Amino acid sequence: MAIKGVIFDLDGVITDTAEFHYRAWQDLGEKIGITFDRAFNENLKGISRMDSLNLILEHGNKADDYSDAEKEALATDKNDDYKTLIEEITPTDILPGIQTFLDACIAKGMKLALASASKNGPAILDRLELTDYFEVTVDPASLKNGKPDPEIFLKAAKLLHLEPFECIGVEDAEAGIQSINAAGMFSVGVGSPESMKEADIFVENTQELDLEKIINKYKKMR
């Protein structure tokens, strides 16, 4: 049994836009009178924009202060701010080791997909000059459920015309690893041993990603 597809998260795996998200959410928080720190911001990684907003509103005891339409407007304001910030992104912002890992996957004939909760994924890939590596990008607006639900990874496999067991997923968030596992895929985690404890294999940073090691572990487990 061979790996035929590799499905990537974006933030924290291919590039690190977490700081831009943090700054944009903080700007919004200031406008609506809610403050939070970097520790709280960890809760926002890997989940959708609206889920992030709802967590922030709950954190500020303002969960019932806004209608659905008002929440949509707040999320749009945050995203407009974020899109301005990410205009600073260039290929130098590709995380260490990722270009080599992508090249190794392509050399093995593997199909690549992006499965990010970020609706800005295609724009970011363009700025990183990585668009041509990816056969498909899952549109998060087409999904009913966010991570840790497996829907986004199952959709990616379907778009690649592959079975889930033929794919591996690469994630840096616990919710993402849970999503990959629930999809019946082999999970590759990037992060601390504690946060990646549910991953089939993990590395502490992207520079340690080694396709041959991943393939060997995949074969042993399958």
Image (cartoon, helix red, strand yellow):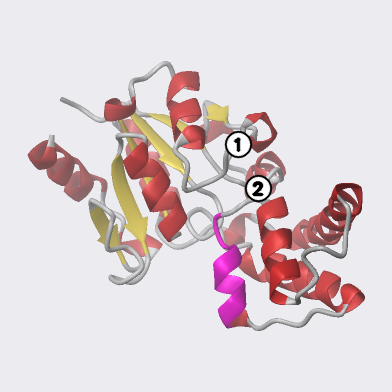
Closer to the camera, 134 or 174?
Answer: 174
Q: Is residue 189 left or right of residue 87?
A: left
103 w.r.t. 95: above or below: above
The amino acid on which the numbered mark 1 sits, given as a three-letter code, is: Thr
Q: Nearer the viewer, mark 2 or mark 1?
A: 2
Quadrant of the rendered image containing residue 92: bottom right
Instruction: Please name the residue that numbered disc 2 is placed on.
Output: 118
Closer to the camera, 159 or 75?
Answer: 75
* Quadrant for the C terminus in the image: top left
The amino acid on which the numbered mark 2 sits, given as a three-letter code, is: Ser
Disc ID at residue 141:
none
Residue at 57 percent of width and 32 percent of height:
132
The range drawn in magenta is 39-46
Disc ID at residue 131:
1
Residue at 64 percent of width and 37 percent of height:
140
Residue 40 is one of the magenta-drawn residues: yes
Closer to the camera, 125 or 141?
Answer: 141
Quadrant of the rendered image containing residue 190: bottom left
